[in-house]
Amino acid sequence: MILEVKDVDYAYKSQKTKQILNHVSMQFEEGTFYTLVGPSGAGKTTFLSLLAGLDTPVKGSILYHGNEISHQVLNYHRRHHVSLVFQNYNLIDYLTAEENVRLGGGKDPGKLLEEVNIPREDWKRNVLKLSGGQQQRVAIARALSSEAKVLLADEPTGNLDENTAQEIIDLLKKTAHELGKCVIVVTHSRHLAEEADEVIQIKDGESV
Amino acid sequence: MNHMQLAWRSVIRKPVKSMLLLLVVCVISVFLLSGMAASNASVAVQDKTRQAVGAGLLLVENEANRHTRLDRITEKIGEKEGSLDGVHQKKLETADGPVWMSYTDSSFETLRLEDIEKLAAVPGISDYNIATAPMAVNPVNFSRIEDPDLDQTGDKLGVSLIGNRDMTMDFNVLSGNVTMKEGRMVTREDQNVCVISEELAAHNGLKIGDKMEFNDYHDRENADAHAAEIIGIYQVKQKMTPYMSGDTYRSENVIFTDLRFPEKAEGAEGDPLFEKAYFMVEDVDQYDAVKEAVKKVKIGWERYDLIDNKGNLETMSSNFRDLQKISQIMIGVVAGASFVILFFVFLFWLKNRTQEVGIFLSLGIPKQRILGQILLEAFMIAAVAVTLSFAVAPGVSKITADYLVSQQIEQAEVEEELNEGKVAKSGQDPEQEVTGVHVEITPQMIAFDSLGIVVLITTSVLTAGISVVKRNPRDILTS
């Protein structure tokens, strides 16, 4: 077990009475492809943010390899334990594809870009000049360049056409099954959810 | 990819943002440098007086010592009527009870002749002049020039006499303001002679060789009249500033006489009031040595001020001390305004780079490192901007300094115009004019400017960065 969520509660600081997550507990294994599904506002993205160490729960704890993530090591957790892929790609707009991948860590960016099928002639192009699908593949390559064992993705196919979305799904599955990483994806896509090894449903802030 | 590489790429690949900051920093740097250069500008002043007189030393009474002496003598006299060393004390009965009044005569106020002669004997002093204070006397056989619209009630209804040992060294003559129209000036051999203004001569139909009579204005009817022969008629470039208010001291009514005539006309022969003594240094190259020798002469120096030939220039530079003040204010205003402008520039930067900051945070890069990158980018741009400003600043500094000096001159002229005839002065102001303003950007200024820019940028980035530091990564990413 790589990640464990224990009895986590979350509420916004400005609206403390409105509970976003209620006593959520889960466990995640390496080499498994998880999808988090549920209606809008159910707390899926919030849950992913807590796993990523972008925010902290009001109550409960999140453990990585049995060690609790605390405020002091959130940067370290984000740098070394998890990597993130977003719906809007979140690439640095003044860098090339290769330079964006390099930001993720020390691995050979060319090899990673090859793995995610980015043509060599596009490696040195500014990322904004690439297509949406290519940008998302660059974002995945950046996530893979990290030594992190957990890949978290928030609606990674949300902005992509069907064919490109399938390519991304295949990449994520490959990441889990061939690279042995724990891949957790928040999605509204039924198709993507069906591709997962395990589907977790969140409704009204609780795991169902 | 390290900090430096990221910062460099951001600077180069986001040219609009970089150019905006470059422009702002360059302007700030130019203004800071101009302020510093203007505050250190050397204003070249042509002092026509100094050119005319060459090197000389002026002896005048020390005002502070005058008060000390007066207090000491008054104390010695005590609470009784009496006179001592030129100080007189009288008891006046008033409605509120008795009041003690003290007044002085010329023997208290005058420069001592023996002291003047001792200084004149110092080797290196080629000649000297003694000038009396303007002395009010009554015109007996002529009429003075009056302003018909002026109330003469408080006036002494006289004319004023200035005695000179050698009129060519009178300050009004040395300054170039008084020149002869006819006849000659008073020399040390002359007795009972005078030089009058062309206006007074025309007003009374007087000519060289005529005799003018004067007596004590305190007793116009009975006091003995003293005659002085007119040996010259003078003209002025601009009216002499009145010694005191009233037509007695107006420029046209000033009459130059031989040294001892004023005291006779006033009815106080043997009680002169020598106000100034001027010592001419023979060899200008020996000026400092002669000055030191003069200072070593044993006289009661506490009574006197010795003004050297730089006196006029010091007065002139004191006017331009305002230039330094204005420049320093300018530096302060520029620094304050720069901080505000830079703060908003960096706030704008950070607002536009929120997503980038969020991405870095999601990659586990600490906030301080992200701010560090922003700071690094700012320094890279600032380095270019400051270098550019070094090229532009000399020209801008010159324009700034010229403008500030011209404003100062204009202001001084307005003040002079407003004060004309209202402020008492003991002589004609020297004719001085600004012939050039020299500004220089020194390495020290460049160092201060660079340091100032570093401080301004650092504080602005850190202040603007508070908005980032306070928020959690998730809020930044979702905003």
Image: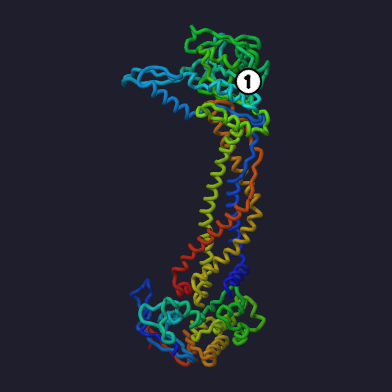
- What residue do we see at 58% from left, 66% from top? B377
Q: What element carries label 1?
A: helix
- B434 lies above or below A98: above
Kind of residue at badge 1: Met
**Quarter of the image containing the C terminus of chain A?**
bottom left
Vertical order, B247 against B447 (above or below): above
For disc 1, the neighbor class at 10 Å (few under 14, some 14 to 19, many from 20) is: many
Q: Where is residue A1 in the image (x, y as percent from the top left)?
A: 43, 90
Looking at the picture, tell me which residue is in the foreground, B75 or B384: B75
- In terms of depth relative to the viewer, which is nearer, B32 or A40? B32
Please state if B346 lies on the left or on the right of A11 as rendered: right
Residue B251 shows in the view: yes
Which chain is home to disc 1?
Answer: B
Tag 1 residue = B167
Using the image as rendered, state which of residue B155 and residue A48 is in the foreground. B155
Q: Who is closer to the viewer here, B155 or B227?
A: B227
List x then y, in percent, for residue B294: 59, 29
- Tell me if B105 is positioned left or right of B435 in this view: left
Q: Can residue A160 be seen in this view?
A: no
